[in-house]
Amino acid sequence: MKVFAVAEHRFGELNPLSIELLNLANKLGESNAVVIGKDVGKFADELAKYADKVWKIEDASLENYNPELYIDVLLQLFQKEKPDVVLIGNTAQGAEYAPYLAVKLNAPIVTDVVGVNTANGLVASRFVMQGKIMVDLKIKSMPCVLTVRQGAFKEGVQKNGKIVDAGIKPSVAAKRKFIEYVQPEAGEVDITKANIIVAVGRGIEDAANISLAEELAKALGGVVAGSRPVIDNGWLPKDRQVGISGKVVKPKLYLALGISGAFQHVMGMKDSELIIAINKDPEAPIFGVAHYGVVANLFDIVPELLDKLKGK
Amino acid sequence: MKIIVLAKHAPDPQSEVGVAGDGKSLSLGTAVFDINDWDRYAVEEAIRIKEKMGGEVVVVGVGKSEDTLRKCLAMGADRAIKIPFDAGLDAYQTAEVICEAIKNEKFDMIFAGLMSQDYNNSQVGVILAAMLNLPFATAVTSLEIGNGVVKVKREIEGGYQEAVQLPMPCLLTIQSGINEPRYVSVMGIKKAKTKELKEVSITPKMSTVEVAKMYLPPVKKAELITGDPSQIATKIIAILKDRGLIG
């Protein structure tokens, strides 16, 4: 099987997920990396350690990611090279252009893939229902496009691939224009430096209840953070968000209150030293990552914890 | 400004969901259905733009979408198109029937939620953009309409955002938190009853993926702390003391 993995980079850094894509590519067959940008030599060198072949696509107009130009140059390459499988990271960038590219390749697409099986055609596994249920999807025709979840293909082999210039330039003028990257605003509390985090999710139910979490954080000597629904509702500022689109934290204690454990959140806290989760739903995916779990209403447990901490 | 918004009637993953007896579909017996959370923000954003600039908001629902479409009309959308076909996990099919239903509408923008809360595919919006050859941006967290262009910020990793500009017509997928969606008023519900909800039957021609198997994921389970609330609190405190996290 001829597999092409599209590497990703931003701010001069190769996204390590690019290597994970090559791990999967090597498992499936002939591995080709594609790297797109203005000056991609150092990324190509790194990718060559894990790929049979690296294709460089370089042009000044490719300095910043633009989906229309990425799709255009990839289509030019794939029309010549005829891949069976195209692998793209399931990131803010990859998940954006992959479905569009798939349509133009007339290819089925499966997003956020965590497993691939080729015993009986090509079958890709992914989660649905925010991590509660898994589904195996049989792909009906080739080529196909898969976007791959970070952390799913960590193991791989080393290679010493050759690097070639694909000799491809953008053939269209993009309608969408890149303006700038906007940095996150710096808040008063840096949750990435806290040893103890009391994190609240949708189960906290109301803005007024945040004070309960704050009281507990104070008693434990920690800070309060939140998952996406809490930030979306404006109950905590954006710089307190834990997850892929927020902050990645590794505290000594992560106490998760009423957090279901969507993948985007888990990626931001799974490496915490001790994770204790309190949630009403026994099937909540957070119990798959927590060290200790309490299946209960947080409003029954937190006041008891506060009483005991104050009385100690 | 004419905006088409895609709205899905979807089960809440927080409610009790499982795998059906056939091992290939969801069991949703007691699940609570509502407008897909991301679509709620998309509908609100479209209505706000209409309230400011005038125009029309058309909501499109695929599958069992009547309750959600009525809700969107009650929020302030002008009319709705319902396509009864349910494509399941094949986003191509969903996009294809939407494409067919809206191809004669002269819209300025299409809004879709970033993903659906049940399948989490994040595909339908972008596939539709490709079928219509539209410029697009995903995970939009703010937008500003200028003279024939829209400036958006889209969410990327690590708290960063990317600012880009697109000409209209274009398609945007909306990230949650972009606004505060309104509650549906009694007046809104009354008005919604008089608004157009057109049903169009379309069957897709293509089929790209099929469910081979659906199952509960194998997960490492946390050690459960049980007892009454007081006993549970005592056990948690013992763990924290044991780890030296509290004195």
Image: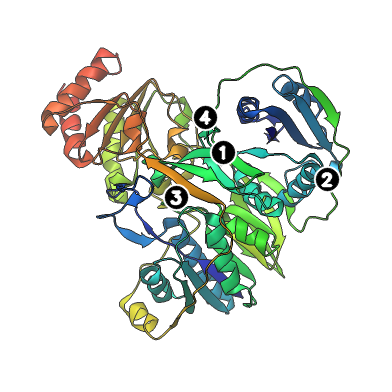
Residue A162 in picture, x, y percent from top left:
81, 22
Which image quarter: residue A43? top right
Whether the residues at callouts 4 and 3 have beta carbons within 8 Å, the answer is no
The residue indicated by pointer 3 is: B119
Work out whether residue B110 or residue A210 is closer to the camera in this orientation and state it.
Answer: B110
Neighbour tally class for label 3: few under 14, some 14-19, many 20 plus, Cα within 10 Å: many
Q: Quadrant of the C terminus of chain A?
A: top left
Label 1 secondary element: loop
* Badge 3: chain ID: B
Q: Is residue A126 above or below residue B13?
A: above
Work out whether residue A4 or residue B191 is closer to the camera in this orientation and state it.
Answer: A4
Viewer-nearest of discs 3 and 1: 1
Amino acid type of the residue that numbered disc 2 sits on in the rendered structure: Ser
The residue indicated by pointer 1 is: A122
The answer to whether residue B216 is left or right of residue B54 is left
Q: Which mark is residue A152?
A: 4
Amino acid type of the residue that numbered disc 3 sits on in the rendered structure: Tyr
Are both tags, 2 and 3, on one chain?
no
Q: Is residue B199 above or below residue B146?
A: below
Are both tags, 4 and 3, on one chain?
no
Question: Taking the image as drawn, is residue B116 in sight?
Answer: yes
Residue A296 in picture, x, y percent from top left:
20, 38
Label 2 secondary element: helix
Q: Which mark is residue A61?
A: 2
Q: Is residue B187 above or below residue A73?
A: below
Between marks 2 and 4, how big is the CA–CA gap? 32 Å
Which residue is located at x 65 percent, y 30 percent?
A18
